[in-house]
Amino acid sequence: MKTLKFKTNINCGGCVSKVTPFLNKQEGIESWEVDTDNPDKILTIKSAGASEEDVKTTLQKIGFKAESVSSN
């Protein structure tokens, strides 16, 4: 299982509920969460096959930006 991290503009509960159905049905995502308290609004995804590109594309389709953050 890989952990993917993204800087996003998902900045409130309303935004989280907007992306929820899309991330939940995204192929290859085991679980995910957004830290809206973090200034970078970090989206953490436990990936069971989804790539960074998959996630970015899904979020872009619904109007959100996601930028990969290298996990250290």
Image (cartoon, rainbow, N blue to C red):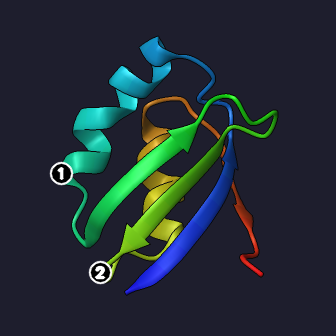
Measuring from the top left, give residue 12's x and y in whole percent. 56, 17
**Secondary structure at numbered mark 1:** helix
Measuring from the top left, give residue 49's x and y in whole percent. 32, 83
Dividing the picture into quadrants, the one containing residue 48 is bottom left
| Local crowd size for mark 1, using a 10 Å CA cut-off: few (<14), some (14–19), many (≥20) | few
Left or right: 61, with 63 as reference point: left
Q: Which residue is drawn at 45% across and 47% down?
A: 33
Quadrant where the C terminus is found in the figure: bottom right
Disc 1 marks which residue?
Answer: 25
Tell me if residue 8 comes above or below residue 62 in the rendering.
Answer: below
Q: Tell whether label 1 touches label 2 (CB within 8 Å).
A: no
Which amino acid, by three-letter code, is at mark 1?
A: Lys
Q: Which mark is residue 48?
A: 2
Rounded to the nearest angstrom, the CA distance separating label 2 from label 1 is: 13 Å
Tell me if residue 65 comes above or below residue 26 in the rendering.
Answer: above
| Local crowd size for mark 2, using a 10 Å CA cut-off: few (<14), some (14–19), many (≥20) | some
Which amino acid, by three-letter code, is at mark 2?
A: Ala
Q: Which residue is drawn at 74% across and 36% down?
A: 38
Left or right: 36, with 24 as reference point: right
Quadrant where the N terminus is found in the figure: bottom left
Tell me if residue 69 comes above or below residue 67 in the rendering.
Answer: below
Dividing the picture into quadrants, the one containing residue 46 is bottom left
